[in-house]
Image: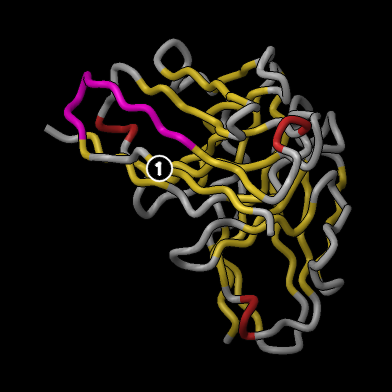
């Protein structure tokens, strides 16, 4: 079965860093573009970042550009999100999600259950 | 990267058909065939229902269909069922290598 499992969420103070991980199973991870999408409490979905299948192309939402870094290790079938200079408004459930192909912009056909990041003093 | 515009809520009775609109601009919804739709039940991960404006993934009921006219995309659900009650989000390529979501629509099946 196709699965994505996120981890790494925690409660952190503003200005601190956190790294999220997403382990894939049940499909050929290395041929799919991968996304991070977040959802603040009681709010809608917000796209965060995408990486191409080989990790060479990475794009970000303006709200996280310069603070967050998406990366992947295809040998470990793992997607990462390094989050620096965290702000209260970054508080959300963070989902990793798979693109149906190597093309980044078709949307997301497989989603993980998410990991919760709370930024609070 | 402005959010796409969706109605906050829609409702219908079992067996009826409803449509949810998603309005963007000529820079996003109107310029690419890259609108997708997601269903999200409370506490669950989103599920892809439509991609590339009109395509339905395998396993998704044919009661769900997508369409687009100009800068507005629509999701239509026919033969409403109680289990269709959920939040629905549209998403589009936003230009400049970004994706943009709509604010979400809460569907109530009366």
Q: Going 31% across and 38% down the picture, which residue do you hit?
A: A91
Judged left or right of residue A70, residue B73 is right
- Provide the residue designation for mark 1: A7
Name the foreground residue: A103 vs A45: A103
Please determine whether, in this image, residue A8 is positioned above or below residue A13.
below
Q: Residue furthest front?
A: A75
Q: Is residue A16 magenta?
A: yes
Residue B25 at least partly seen: no
Occupied quadrant, residue A107: top right
Judged left or right of residue B54, residue B40 is left
Q: Quadrant of the N terminus of chain B?
A: top right
Residue B49 at least partly seen: yes
Name the foreground residue: A9 vs A107: A9
Percent coordinates x, y for residue B49 in the rendering: 74, 59
Chain ID of residue with mark 1: A
Q: Provide the residue span drawn in magenta.
A: A12-21
Q: Going 80% across and 30% down the picture, which residue do you hit?
A: A102
Percent coordinates x, y for residue A81 in the rendering: 46, 27
Q: Quadrant of the C terminus of chain B?
A: bottom right
Please determine whether, in this image, residue A31 is positioned above or below residue A41.
above
Q: Going 68% across and 54% down the picture, which residue do you hit?
A: A2
Percent coordinates x, y for residue B42 in the rendering: 46, 67
């Amino acid at each position: 079965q196709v699965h994505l499992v996120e981890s790494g969420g925690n409660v952190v103070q503003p200005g601190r860093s956190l790294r999220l991980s997403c382990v894939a199973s049940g499909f050929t991870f290395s041929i799919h573009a991968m996304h991070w999408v977040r959802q603040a409490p009681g709010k809608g979905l917000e796209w965060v970042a995408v990486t191409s299948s080989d990790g060479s192309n990475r794009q970000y939402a303006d709200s996280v550009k310069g603070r967050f870094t998406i990366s992947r290790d295809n040998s470990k079938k793992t997607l990462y999100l390094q989050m620096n200079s965290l702000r209260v408004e970054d508080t959300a459930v963070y989902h990793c999600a798979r693109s149906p192909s190597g093309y980044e912009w078709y949307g997301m056909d497989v989603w993980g259950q998410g990991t919760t990041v709370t930024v609070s003093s | 990267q402005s959010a796409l515009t969706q109605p906050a809520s829609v409702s219908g009775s079992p067996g009826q058909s409803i449509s949810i609109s998603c309005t963007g601009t000529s820079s996003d919804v109107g310029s690419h065939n890259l609108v997708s739709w997601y269903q999200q039940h409370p506490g669950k991960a989103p599920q892809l229902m439509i991609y590339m404006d009109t395509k339905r993934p395998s396993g998704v009921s044919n009661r769900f269909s997508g369409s687009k006219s100009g800068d507005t995309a629509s999701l239509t659900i026919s033969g409403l069922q109680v289990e269709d009650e959920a939040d629905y989000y549209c998403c589009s390529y936003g230009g400049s290598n970004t994706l943009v979501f709509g604010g979400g629509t809460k569907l109530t099946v009366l």
